[in-house]
Amino acid sequence: MQNKFLKNAKPSKLSKPSKAPTHYTFTLSYQLSKDDRDVDTLVERLGIPCFEDALIRITRSGRLSLTYICLASEASSSMSRRCIDFQMLVPSAKFLSWARRDGAYMP
């Protein structure tokens, strides 16, 4: 039996409509410690499913950038998830910045 209040309920004016998933392109930048600069080891660590679609760049000075495209309803939640996943894999890396292709930037 359905509750009579739920039957006649209308959406709240305060509730936001759910945003349709959009493709976002992000670049995460990190400074690697001297101990984590072995390219083969890093690529092997980043071979897990959440980073298998990332373009990985490592410079001679030890900067690493990950560029990826993801489908998400909110850019910030996808970004945060990737940052946390990376920090778990390479805890000694220092986060430098992230950028979104549409111009959003966070130092």
Image: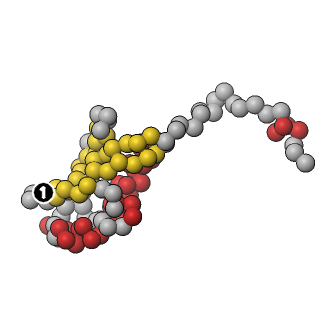
The front one of 74 and 49 is 49
Residue 20 as seen in the image, left or right of residue 103: right
Q: Position of residue 29 (x, y in %)?
A: 24, 51
User: Which residue does the image show at 79% across and 33% down from the upper left?
Assistant: 9
Q: Position of residue 4 (x, y in %)?
A: 88, 38
Specify the farthest residue to the top.
13
Q: Quadrant of residue 12?
A: top right
> Can the viewer see residue 68 in this picture?
yes
The front one of 98 and 50 is 50
Count of marks overlaid on the render: 1
Residue 35 as seen in the image, left or right of residue 54: left
Q: Quadrant of residue 34?
A: bottom left
Residue that mark 1 sits on:
59
Q: Amino acid at mark 1?
A: Thr
User: Which residue does the image show at 38% across and 58% down from the upper left?
Assistant: 84
> Can the viewer see residue 95 in this picture?
no
Residue 30 as seen in the image, left or right of residue 13: left
Q: Position of residue 46 (x, y in %)?
A: 30, 65
* 40 relative to 29, above or below: below
Q: Secondary structure at mark 1?
A: loop
